[in-house]
Image (cartoon, rainbow, N blue to C red):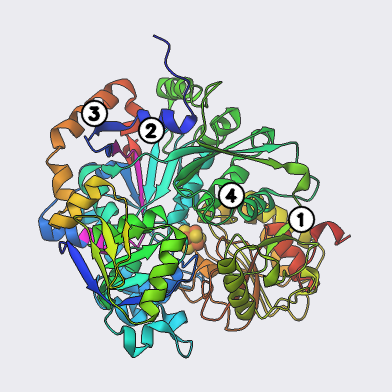
């Protein structure tokens, strides 16, 4: 995963609430066995509308997306994060995110920034003017050329992984001994739990 | 030492924490992992590239469901029929190869036990009370109906579970949805959960794990509880839970992967401790009056867009907040509906009975009870019933339900996700409407341009007969 420290650039002013992962990437694009090339299907139904923000040349290649409440709700498909990454999106700003999608985003080096609705509204305005927005993960701030400055919260572990581009699987495998101890305890106390399909 | 009263969620959580990190993230043990063909190929690929084995292959069960066509899987000579779509075929082939390569039990597409992951898990007794269950699929919440902490994960997490049998998680907050009183006649578990989502909103459970409480749930069968918990994700919750009880134990006893003998007794004794303690504190509590719940139907493109069947298509201007007004206008435009239209005047061309929400035997019985001796209306072009598993299908056929459906003009299909999502050949054509027992009415969910109205199995059957959305209680 690519580390993420600071992102500066134009922001796509989507603003829509309840953007589900079927909107981000429709099911017919999920038939792939790879993570690449999903940008072609990203936001397909929205892009079918004339004058949509995604195909507006002003936002071509913009690394930031601004959305409404409950971004990424619905299906757990990580393809949504892969599709956004393929479009070049590294930061999404919204008043709230679905739990699953924000986890998927972070694991792919995309930063979900939660800000209150009024801050999001202000950033939408700035984005619509075509002005750049700066998101700095180290200081947990979002700033604009108009001196707007918003701070956001992020789970310290997620921040650490994003800043350093860390692979969670590798980190957890290093805890193999603790996991083994837990399993041994369970196997002794509640053996049925460890049988699974081998019963 | 007397411990603090805990919620059911907290009890299951506490029992699975391997260790807690300084920053509050917990390494949580995963007891059961379900895998299907769509969200797993990239996870297996990553393991292979890194040379990582699967830590506990016996705790994962793999079955294909999303991509499979629901037409017959064997030809006249008993040979498997290949999938025509090359990409779908490649995904299926990947799972068929990956599961044995990593030592994972695989249920093939042609097996009687094949079905939708969330139907198969409980049916096989693989999903058990008090366990943590994950799957690369958001409707994993379904298994909460057995009193399991079950939730959907992304593909990176699928890889994480395969390699480590754990996940790094932040604890959610416990939320209670308490339903008081009893449901009226003709009102089902699906109507109740749609009503609840309509009340709390598509993000109302965000950051929470919901426990459904009240005698309504105690009176429900396991199938009904699975339907309720299934749609917790549609309220934004990470998971949904109903405390296990004798109904749960009776359902699980004797299932192939459920504990046996002395282990069964020990398991039941443990499961009896799995309920929220008196005085346990919920971070959020919502009370629903069961008497207010009517057969429910969605009008828009978010599962929170719910009205009773006696209601009308809403006016966008009636919503308090601007973003909802914008969303409602967009939804109505997509759905081709005029504000103020009575829901019972909305004609439908397609009916889908199936999905992990409503494809179990009881769902099929409820729909068949309505259809018996009736036929679908002429304007209903396409009506299909897709059992949740081969075992459900066989049971329904033993009861003669297949004949009821076929005589009513429905097609009787092979198990799979089918028209729940536009991924396999079962799709609703653009601009057409579908009364669907599935769980998502998102834009394009049932196919590009498809218009979905979420309903219960009985209401889907009523819609088929009436040729429009209809109140099953008034069918006479
Ligand atoms: S039936 Fe629908 S919701 Fe359920 S697992 Fe399949 S695609 Fe997902």
Q: Which mark's residue is nearer the viewer, 1 or 4?
A: 4
- The residue lying at 46 percent from left, 61 percent from top is A117
Task: Give the CA separation, mark 4 to mark 2.
Answer: 23 Å
The chain ID associated with circle 4 is B
Res B65 visible: no
Q: Which residue in the structure is indicated by mark 3?
A: A182
- When asked about the image quadrant of residue B49, the answer is bottom left
Mark 3 and mark 1 residues within 8 Å of each other at the beta carbon: no
Task: Please tell me which of labels 2 and 1 falls first in the chain.
Answer: 2
Q: Secondary structure at mark 4?
A: helix
Between B309 and B288, the one lying in front of the other is B288
* Rendered image: mark on residue B227: 4
Q: Which mark's residue is nearer the viewer, 2 or 3?
A: 2
* Rendered image: mark on residue B13: 2
* Rendered image: mark on residue B433: none
Mark 4 and mark 2 residues within 8 Å of each other at the beta carbon: no
Res B87 visible: yes
Task: Give the CA separation, mark 3 to mark 1.
Answer: 49 Å
Task: Please tell me which of labels 1 and 4 falls first in the chain.
Answer: 4
Q: Secondary structure at mark 1?
A: helix
Point out residue B452 in the picture as x, y percentages from the top left corner: 61, 71
Q: Which residue in the structure is indicated by mark 1?
A: B369
Task: Please tell me which of labels 4 and 2 falls first in the chain.
Answer: 2
Above-or-below relation of A13 to B226: below
The chain ID associated with circle 2 is B
Point out residue B414 in the picture as x, y percentages from the top left corner: 53, 65
- The residue lying at 47 percent from left, 50 percent from top is B206
Q: Secondary structure at mark 3?
A: helix
From which residue to which does the magenta span run? B28-44
Between B171 and A40, the one lying in front of the other is B171
Mark 2 is surrounded, within 10 Å at the Cα level, by few (under 14), some (14 to 19) or many (20 or more) other residues, namely: some
Point out residue B443 in the picture as x, y percentages from the top left corner: 53, 74
């Amino acid at each position: 995963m690519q580390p993420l420290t600071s992102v500066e650039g134009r922001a796509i002013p989507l603003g829509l609430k309840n953007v589900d992962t079927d909107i981000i990437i429709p099911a017919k694009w999920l038939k792939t066995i790879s993570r690449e090339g999903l940008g072609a299907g990203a936001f397909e139904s929205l892009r079918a509308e004339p004058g949509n923000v995604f195909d507006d040349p002003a936002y071509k290649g913009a690394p930031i997306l601004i959305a409404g409440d409950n971004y990424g709700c619905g299906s757990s498909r990580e393809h949504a994060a892969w599709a956004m990454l393929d479009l070049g999106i590294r930061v999404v700003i919204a008043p709230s995110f679905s739990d699953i999608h924000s986890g998927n985003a972070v694991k792919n080096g995309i930063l979900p920034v939660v800000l209150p609705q009024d801050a999001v509204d202000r950033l939408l305005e700035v984005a619509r003017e075509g002005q750049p927005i700066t998101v700095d993960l180290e200081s947990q701030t979002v700033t604009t050329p108009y001196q707007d400055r918003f701070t956001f919260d992020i789970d310290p572990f997620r921040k650490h992984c994003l800043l350093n581009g860390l692979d969670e699987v590798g980190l957890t495998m290093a805890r193999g001994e603790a996991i083994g101890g837990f399993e041994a305890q369970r196997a002794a106390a509640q053996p049925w739990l460890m049988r699974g399909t081998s019963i | 030492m007397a411990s603090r009263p805990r919620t059911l969620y907290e009890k299951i959580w506490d029992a699975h924490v391997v260790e807690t990190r300084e920053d509050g993230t917990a390494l949580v043990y995963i007891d059961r992992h379900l895998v299907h063909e769509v969200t797993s190929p990239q996870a297996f690929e990553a393991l292979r590239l890194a040379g990582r084995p699967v830590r506990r292959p016996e705790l994962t069960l793999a079955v294909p469901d999303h991509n499979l066509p629901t037409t017959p899987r064997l030809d006249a000579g008993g040979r498997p029929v290949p999938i025509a779509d090359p990409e779908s075929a490649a995904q299926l082939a990947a799972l068929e190869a990956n599961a044995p390569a990593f030592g994972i039990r695989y249920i093939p597409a042609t097996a009687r036990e094949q079905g939708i992951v969330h139907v198969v898990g409980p049916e096989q007794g693989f999903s058990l009370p008090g366990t943590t269950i994950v799957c690369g699929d958001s409707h994993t919440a379904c298994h909460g109906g057995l009193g399991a902490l079950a939730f959907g994960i992304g593909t990176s997490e699928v890889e994480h579970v395969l390699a480590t049998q754990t996940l790094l998680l932040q604890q959610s907050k416990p939320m209670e949805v308490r339903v008081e009183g009893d449901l009226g006649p003709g009102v089902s578990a699906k109507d109740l959960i749609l009503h609840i989502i309509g009340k709390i909103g598509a993000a109302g459970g965000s950051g929470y794990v919901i426990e459904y409480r009240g005698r309504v749930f105690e009176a429900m069968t396991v199938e009904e509880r699975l339907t309720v918990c299934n749609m917790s994700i549609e309220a934004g919750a990470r998971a949904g839970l109903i405390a296990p009880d004798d109904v749960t134990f009776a359902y699980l006893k004797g299932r192939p992967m459920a504990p046996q003998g002395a282990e069964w007794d020990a398991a039941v004794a443990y499961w009896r401790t799995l309920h929220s303690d008196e005085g346990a504190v919920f971070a959020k509590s919502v009370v629903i009056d069961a008497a207010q719940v009517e057969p429910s139907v969605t009008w828009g493109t978010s599962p929170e867009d719910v009205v009773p069947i006696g209601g009308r298509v809403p006016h966008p201007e009636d919503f308090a907040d601007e973003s909802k007004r914008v969303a409602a206008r967009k939804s109505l435009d997509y759905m081709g509906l005029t504000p103020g239209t009575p829901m019972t005047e909305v004609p439908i061309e397609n009916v889908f009975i199936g999905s992990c929400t409503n494809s179990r035997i009881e769902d099929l019985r409820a729909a068949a009870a309505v259809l018996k001796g009736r036929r679908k209306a002429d304007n209903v072009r396409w009506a299909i019933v897709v059992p949740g598993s081969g075992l459900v299908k066989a049971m329904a056929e033993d009861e003669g339900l297949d004949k009821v459906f076929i005589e009513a003009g429905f097609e009787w299909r092979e198990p799979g996700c089918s028209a729940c999502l536009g991924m396999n050949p079962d799709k609703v054509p653009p601009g057409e409407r579908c009364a669907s027992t599935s769980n998502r009415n998102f834009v394009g969910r049932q196919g590009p341009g498809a218009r979905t109205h979420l309903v219960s199995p009985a209401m889907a059957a009523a819609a088929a007969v009436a040729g429009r959305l209809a109140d099953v209680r008034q069918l006479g």
